Image (cartoon, rainbow, N blue to C red):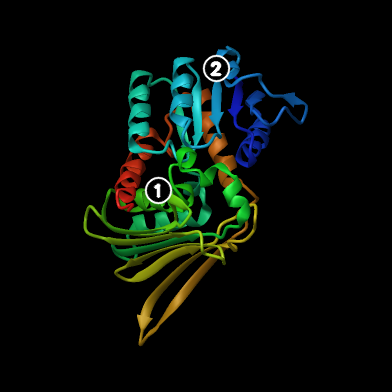
């Protein structure tokens, strides 16, 4: 069995998805629509986005659009009976995501997956396995940082337009860290939030300091920043007997450093032993794993396990609460 895919939006992420899906044996043909890209590697853009939905040969749509239109695009995909892969976030609000959840309940045979690719990171999976096995005791605290820099080109893109993006650095990048903590620790409650916006861009936050607490009392601190000039991804879990952490991520910029996991344990007179693992993975391997999972779920009629509608609702519930702290 093979499937045909239609990609909506051929920006940098859409181009990446095009190339990855093209290399999957079970994908027979890829079409796309992008208003500013007429041709890509011999493939001509469909004339309109509706052409994707009316084409009965297309089995699944891959949505790489700005955030605001996603809800309506997903609704059209459900209406045309096509499976759905949508880049994160699932929309710009919880209300968007609840509409998607309702559509999915009405059409449960349609596969829908959201692109929370960081769950596929090798060092994250190591952390999750280590914490879940309980070898070092229960978690006592969690600290996460995810940040990058920006330049004037940021203001030329849709992410600087709140009506299209829905928010700033937290919704764009920090949501990955929030999703990892939800996956690792379980349900969370927002305790307090500090948001700093760009002076000339209300509601486009450039710094987000977020304190949460898990259902069983674990305190969590997250920092998402556009002023993290030395790009950084770091997630640490302090347990009863060790600190289990990860840092770095493979990206197109190569600016976050190598992917490394660490366990610091056996405290003795202010010093600990440290076990370090470094991972050598190909570029965009997490995106590739996501694409494979999505295709396999369609062909083998298997449930989506990462990036589910339920995952999307849980993370967007917290996003709405965090953004309620905007001034």
Q: Picture coordinates of residue 238 (x, y %)?
A: 34, 67
| Residue 33 in the image: above or below residue 327 | above
Residue 89 falls left or right of residue 286 = left
**What is the number of the mark on residue 260?**
none
Q: Are marks 1 and 2 in contact (CB under 8 Å)?
A: no
Most foreground residue, 142 or 302:
142
Q: Residue furthest left?
A: 216
Most foreground residue, 97 or 28:
97
Question: Quadrant where the N terminus lies?
Answer: top right
Q: How many marks?
A: 2
| Residue 117 in the image: above or below residue 216 | above
Q: Residue at position x 64%, y 41% from top?
A: 12
From the image, tell me which residue sits under label 2. Answer: 53
Disc 2 secondary structure class: helix
Tag in front: 1 or 2? 2
Residue 196 falls left or right of residue 295 = left
Q: Residue at position x 21%, y 56% from top?
A: 216
Q: Residue at position x 60%, y 28% from top?
A: 7
Q: Residue at position x 41%, y 54% from top?
A: 129
Q: Residues within 10 Å of mark 1 (few under 14, many from 20)?
A: many
Q: Picture coordinates of residue 236 (x, y %)?
A: 41, 64
Most foreground residue, 27 or 95:
95
* Residue 108 can be seen, yes or no: yes
| Residue 269 in the image: above or below residue 3 | below
Q: Picture coordinates of residue 315 (x, y %)?
A: 36, 44
Most foreground residue, 137 or 27:
27
From the image, tell me which residue sits under label 1. Answer: 179
Image quadrant assignment for residue 141: bottom left
Q: Marks 1/2: CA distance?
A: 30 Å
């Amino acid at each position: 069995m093979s499937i045909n895919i239609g990609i909506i939006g051929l920006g940098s992420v859409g181009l990446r998805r095009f190339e990855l899906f093209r290399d999957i044996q079970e994908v027979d043909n890829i079409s796309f629509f992008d208003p500013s890209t007429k041709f890509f590697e011999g493939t001509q853009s469909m004339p309109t986005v509706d052409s994707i939905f009316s084409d009965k040969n297309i089995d699944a749509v891959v949505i790489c659009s700005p955030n605001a239109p996603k809800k309506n695009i997903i609704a059209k995909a459900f209406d045309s009976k096509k499976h759905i892969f949508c880049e994160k976030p699932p929309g710009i609000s919880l209300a968007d995501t609840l509409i998607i959840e309702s559509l999915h309940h009405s059409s449960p045979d349609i596969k829908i997956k959201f692109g929370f690719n960081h769950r596929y990171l090798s060092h994250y999976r190591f952390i999750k396995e280590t914490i879940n096995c309980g070898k070092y005791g229960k978690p006592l605290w969690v600290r996460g940082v995810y940040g990058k820099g920006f330049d004037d080109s940021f203001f030329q893109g849709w992410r600087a337009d709140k009506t299209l993006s829905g928010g700033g650095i937290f919704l764009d990048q920090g949501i990955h860290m929030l999703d990892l903590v939800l996956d690792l620790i379980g349900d969370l409650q927002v305790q307090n939030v500090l948001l700093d916006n760009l002076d000339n861009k209300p509601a486009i936050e450039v710094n987000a300091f977020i304190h949460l607490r898990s259902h069983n009392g674990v305190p969590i601190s997250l920092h998402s920043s556009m002023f993290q000039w030395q790009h950084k991804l770091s997630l640490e879990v302090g347990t009863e007997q060790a600190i289990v952490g990860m840092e770095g991520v493979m990206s197109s910029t190569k600016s976050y450093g190598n992917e490394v996991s660490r366990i610091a344990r056996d405290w003795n007179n202010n010093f600990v032993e440290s076990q370090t693992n470094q991972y050598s993975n190909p570029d965009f391997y997490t995106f590739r794993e996501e694409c494979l999972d999505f295709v396999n779920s369609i062909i083998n009629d298997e449930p989506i396990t990462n990036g589910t509608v339920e995952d999307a609702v849980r993370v967007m519930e917290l996003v709405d609460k965090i953004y309620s702290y905007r001034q």
